[in-house]
C-alpha cells in the first residue's frame, strides 16, 4: 500500500516510472506518451503531475462513481459469465480519442467529477457485500491510476475477488509487467489496425497496443479479450478487418475472443453515422473465416453474434440476449456438453444470475490517517 499521507493530501501519492532530464524537467515513463513536465505541470492524462522533484498521482482513492454491472458489459464473455462486477473509474486518460464514449469522465479536468472516495479495502469489502465476483477498472484507463489500481487489486485478491482491467493497452513495458501481475482479466481496446488512425483520431500509436496484446498472450496467465469499435469510414473497411483478424490469428491464436462493437456519434465525432448492424455481421464473418473461433457483435441486438458457439460441433454453449444469459451448455469443467471440447476461458461450474441489471452504489469514504 502507499505510504501514509496527511488527510489533506490523501489523494496525492508518489508515482513510479519517471526520471529526471538534463534540462530540469522530469519525464513520465508510465505510457508511451512520455510527458515531460516542469514544476506544477500535469501530463496529458490530467492525473499525473510534477510536484517538486517527483511525479505524483493526484487521484488516489478518488472515483467518478461505482456501479454493479454484468461482466458481459466490459465486455468479457468467457470470464465468469453471468456474474456481477463492481465497476469504477477515476478521471483523465492517456489517449485523446475523438470518438470517446466516456468523454465526460476520461476528458474531465474537474475534481468535482471525482465525487466518490474509497480505500482499496473498502472497495474489496463492498464487492464481497454486493455479491460481485470481480472488480473492474473501467470508464477511463487504469494505466493512469496505476498505483491505486494495483492496491485495489491486492485488497480484492485477499477477499478472493478477481480484478479486471478495461484498457487501451497503451503502456510501457516495465509498468505493464508490474500492473498485470495483479490482474486476473482484461479487455483490451484495439481501436483500429492502422498507425494513421491511432495518430489522427487517438493521438497515439498502434505498436505499443499490439505489444501489450502479445505480452498478455505469451508472458502472462491473464485472461483477456479484445474489443474493436467499428466507425463508419474510419476503421471498418474489409481490408482492415482482414488484416486485423489475420494478425490476431497469427500472433495470439484462435481462442482469444474478439468483440466488434457498434459506434454511436459522440464527443468530437458527431459527423459519423451509427455503425450498421450489417457491418458488424460482415466483420464477424471475416474473423471466423480467418480462423478465429469466438467473434462477437456488440452494442446491437444480435442473438447469434452475441452468443458463444462450440467451434468443434457448432452447439450453442452460451445463448445471450444482450447481457442476459438464456442457456448454458458447458459442463463443470467448461467443456461442451455435446462433444466434450473445452471452451477457453475462466468458468465456474454454474453461471451467475446477475442478468442485465445495472445498479449504482455508494461506498464508504476513505478514512483519514490516524
Image (cartoon, rainbow, N blue to C red):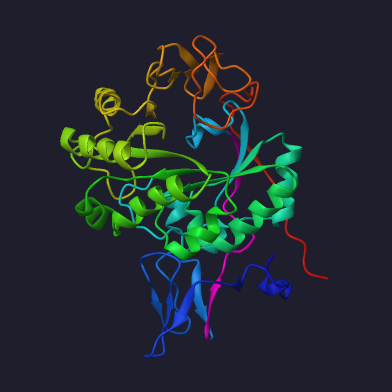
Res. 363 in view: no
Residue 62, above or below 300: below
Q: Residue at point 65% right, 21% down? A: 350
Q: Nearer the viewer, residue 109 or 229?
A: 229
Q: Residue at point 33% right, 50% down? A: 210
Left or right position of 5 against 182? right
The outermost residue toward the right is 370
Q: Nearer the viewer, residue 263 or 161?
A: 161
Based on the picture, tell me whether residue 66 belongs to the magenta stretch. yes
Residue 304, above or below 77: above
Q: Residue 293, position in %: x, y? A: 37, 25
The quadrant in which the C terminus is found is: bottom right
Based on the picture, tell me whether residue 368 belongs to the magenta stretch. no
The outermost residue toward the bottom is 23
Looking at the rendered structure, the number of numbered marks drawn on it comes to 0
Q: Residue 219, position in %: x, y? A: 47, 51
Q: Residue at point 52% right, 15% down? A: 340
Residue 307, quarter of picture: top left
The quadrant in which the N terminus is found is: bottom right
Residue 303, quarter of picture: top left
Q: Residue 8, position in %: x, y? A: 69, 73
What's drawn in magenta, residue-wise?
A: 53-69
Q: Residue 288, position in %: x, y? A: 30, 25
Q: Residue at point 55% right, 12% down? A: 337
Left or right position of 200 against 344? left
Residue 278, above or below 14: above
Res. 194 in view: yes
Left or right position of 227 against 286? right
Left or right position of 204 against 56? left
Amino acid at each position: 500500500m502507499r505510504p501514509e499521507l496527511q488527510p489533506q493530501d490523501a489523494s496525492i501519492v508518489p508515482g513510479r516510472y519517471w526520471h529526471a532530464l538534463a534540462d530540469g524537467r522530469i519525464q513520465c515513463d508510465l505510457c508511451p506518451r512520455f510527458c515531460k513536465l516542469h514544476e506544477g505541470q500535469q501530463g496529458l492524462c490530467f492525473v499525473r503531475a510534477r510536484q517538486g522533484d517527483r511525479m505524483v498521482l493526484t487521484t488516489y482513492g478518488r472515483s467518478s462513481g461505482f456501479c454493479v454491472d454484468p461482466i458481459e458489459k466490459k465486455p468479457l464473455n468467457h470470464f465468469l459469465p453471468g456474474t456481477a462486477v463492481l465497476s469504477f473509474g477515476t478521471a483523465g486518460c492517456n489517449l485523446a480519442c475523438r470518438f470517446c464514449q466516456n468523454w465526460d469522465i476520461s476528458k474531465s479536468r474537474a475534481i468535482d467529477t471525482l465525487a466518490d472516495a474509497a480505500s482499496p479495502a473498502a472497495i474489496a469489502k463492498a464487492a464481497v457485500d454486493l455479491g460481485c465476483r470481480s472488480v473492474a477498472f473501467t470508464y477511463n484507463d487504469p494505466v493512469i491510476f496505476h498505483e491505486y489500481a494495483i492496491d485495489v487489486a491486492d485488497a480484492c485478491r485477499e477477499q478472493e475477488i478477481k480484478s479486471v482491467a478495461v484498457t487501451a493497452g497503451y503502456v510501457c513495458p516495465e509498468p505493464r509487467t508490474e500492473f498485470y501481475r495483479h490482474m486476473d482479466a482484461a479487455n483490451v481496446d484495439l481501436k483500429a489496425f492502422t498507425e494513421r488512425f491511432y495518430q489522427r483520431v487517438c493521438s497515439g500509436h498502434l505498436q505499443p497496443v499490439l505489444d501489450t496484446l502479445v505480452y498478455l498472450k505469451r508472458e502472462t496467465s491473464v485472461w483477456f479479450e479484445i474489443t474493436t469499435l467499428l466507425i463508419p469510414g474510419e476503421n471498418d473497411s474489409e481490408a482492415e478487418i482482414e488484416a486485423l483478424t489475420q494478425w490476431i490469428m497469427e500472433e495470439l491464436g484462435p481462442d482469444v475472443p474478439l468483440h466488434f462493437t457498434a459506434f454511436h456519434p459522440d464527443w468530437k465525432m458527431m459527423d459519423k453515422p451509427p455503425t450498421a448492424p450489417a457491418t458488424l455481421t460482415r466483420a464477424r464473418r471475416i474473423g471466423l473465416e480467418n480462423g478465429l473461433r469466438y467473434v462477437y457483435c456488440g452494442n446491437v441486438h444480435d442473438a447469434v453474434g452475441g452468443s458463444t458457439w462450440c467451434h468443434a460441433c457448432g452447439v450453442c454453449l452460451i445463448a445471450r440476449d444482450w447481457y442476459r444469459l438464456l442457456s448454458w451448455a458447458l459442463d463443470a469443467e467448461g467443456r461442451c456438453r455435446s462433444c466434450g471440447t473445452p471452451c477457453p476461458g475462466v468458468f465456474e461450474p454454474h453461471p451467475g444470475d446477475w442478468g442485465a441489471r445495472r445498479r449504482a452504489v455508494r461506498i464508504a469514504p476513505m478514512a483519514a490517517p490516524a
